[in-house]
Amino acid sequence: MFISLSLSLRAALLALFLAVLALPAAAQTTVVVTGSREALPAERLVGDVLVISAEALRASAADSVEDLLRREAGVQLSRSGGPGANAGLFIRGANTASTLVLIDGVRIGAATSGLPELEALSLASIDRIEVLRGPGSSLYGADAVGGVVQIFTRRGDGAPTASARLAAGGYGAREAALAGSGGFGRVDLAASLSGERNTGVSALRPNDLFGNYNPDRDGYSRRSAQLQAGFSPAAGQRVGLQLLDSLLKSQYDASEFLPPSFAQNNRPDFRNRTELRSATLRHDARWNEAWSTQLRASSQHSDLVAGANAPDHFRTERRELEAQASWRPGSAHSVTLALAHLEEKAQSSSYAADARRDNDALVVAYAGGLGPLQLQAEARHDHNSVYGNVDTGRLGAAWGLGQGWRLRALAASTFRAPSFNDLYFPGYGVTTIQPEHGRSVELGLQWSAGVNAAALTVYRNRVRGLIGYESDRRFCPPGFDYDFGCARNVGRARLQGATLSGSTRVGAWSLRGTVDFLDAIDADSGARLTRRAAHQETLALDYRQARWSAGAELVSVGARPESGKMLAAYTTLDLKARWQLSPGWQLEARLLNATNQDVEPARDYQSLGRQAWLGLRWDWQGL
């Protein structure tokens, strides 16, 4: 039955793609930052950039940042349980640690594990999200192999606004959020507070591979606070302060092996306490039509305490200074020069001493047009105190074919830095580990005309020097600590695939969908990479009237291999509706996983079943 549904969904999406091409055209411009490090119209970018607007974010049925992203083209989700559990993204099949996540330009996540810790972020503090699918190391350095996710928090432009939201749902779920923003002369302010909780289900299924199952409920609580404040001392200039603090407390299933018996004990209540904090002071200036500059100083902290009776503690501190200047000799050309200095420090209850490294980077980027031809080129040099020098680059071109059609091609080099655990974790880390390196090419055909859009992208990415576990003692350092293996640059990967997407709006109806095909394999053994589905489809249908709206979102994910098992394919259906009760007041309802699909997001883990939500929202806008 699932196979029939999956094939029918793919056929429907292909029909959508063809139907969109026959619709009339209208002009539309979207400004994007992530694809070039400066704000440029999307039609001037060669890379594959997706923008999730504030309107789309608010209208989505998604229950988390990672769930929102997985509904978009080219992004698959891996999660160790339900909402609040450890989560990672596979963009175009690249490893979770090969996706760079930024908040307002600041790199976030744990340098110990190398993971971005998306599960600690709340949707309530987000204004919009930009996703660069494909290589981004030439712009942002390490870890942007699969792509870049940049999250933008709210900014207080325009008239004062305020909003509040309360919601409750199944599995003991509760949500509350409060936000306000506005411009007051030369000052702009935006702030938000949010809190949420969910009692959840057991993270693991009975009879799991390692005997860690505990029948207790593994829920989570998360609270988040965000502030943006700015002052404009003169026309074209702004001094801004950005603060974010998010705290996640989540439960999970595991085992301890403590003295004196060292026997396995899976009965304790295992918990993660993850706190993300970032602070940024920046100055943005548009000096004239040709020159603009950005100066930024930022600090980011990640704190994780994980375990039960003998918890482990991991802490990351990052401090970064960045200066950027852009020159526009004409309306069709821009040249950007950026300098950055990054300091990273990691502390762990497992490390013998604090681990540190510094990185200095120089970026030169060009974006320009010659008639129907758009060009984009970047070069970046990184010097790291631990793993030395790395040079990356990206070159692409797009050709406007007329009538909204556009053909684009792109080639780039990338790298992923070893995490501090890869370098220093006792009995595993090896200080001579080198970065992973990749080379990527892609070809895309796009059509865009107002509310109508369609795109086809094919890509191929080869990654060498994959960092992984080496079981052969001969390749590990001397000492009994490495008798069971170590970290090593052990393999190669080939990531290739195609993404087809289409969207349209006709009257009160809007429709969008994607079909993703992915061939992600170990280039040495030919085996498929863990947790990657060979195909994934999404379909979203919305109907809007003046005082109410309704919609449905369908996600279909193919089978995925993990630890000798093939995780079953699944399809989830989410339903949503909104009613305008009076000016400023809105009632919201969602039914997530409406068909109560049994989802195994990772081997032996389980997600939530059917979950109903009911919420009330208040919005106010001043004059």
Image: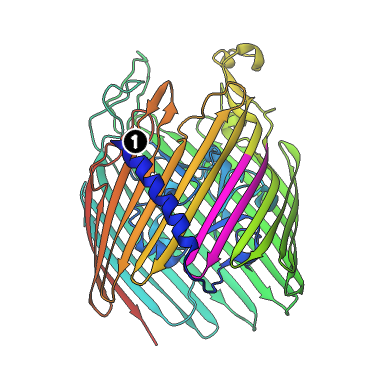
The chief SS type of the magenta part is strand
Residue 461: horizontal and vertical position, in percent?
63, 39
The answer to which quarter of the image holds residue 331 is: bottom right
The type of residue carrying mark 1 is Ile
Q: Position of residue 101 (x, y in %)?
A: 54, 50
Relative to 453, is 35 on the left or the right? right
Q: Is residue 262 above or below residue 268?
A: above
Quarter of the image with the N terminus is: top left
78 in the magenta segment: no
Residue where numbered disc 1 is placed: 3
Let me know if residue 151 appears in the view. Answer: no
Is 459 in the magenta? yes
Number of numbered discs on residues = 1
Position of 232 compared to 302: left or right?
A: right
Residue at horizontal 33%, vertical 72%?
163
Mark 1 residue crowding within 10 angstroms, few (<14) / some (14–19) / many (20+): few
Nearest the eye: 479 or 148: 148
Q: Is residue 130 above or below residue 290?
A: above
Please identify the residue farthest to the front as the structure is shown: 22
Residue 471, picture quadrant: top right
The reply to whether residue 110 is in sight is: yes
Answer with the quarter of the image where residue 92 lies: top right
Q: Dot 1: what SS?
A: helix
| Highlighted range, magenta | 438-460
Where's residue 595, x and y in %? 23, 44
- Quadrant where the C terminus sits is bottom left
* Viewer-closest of 144 and 458: 458
Instruction: Using the image as rendered, state which of residue 37 and residue 433 is in the foreground.
Output: 37
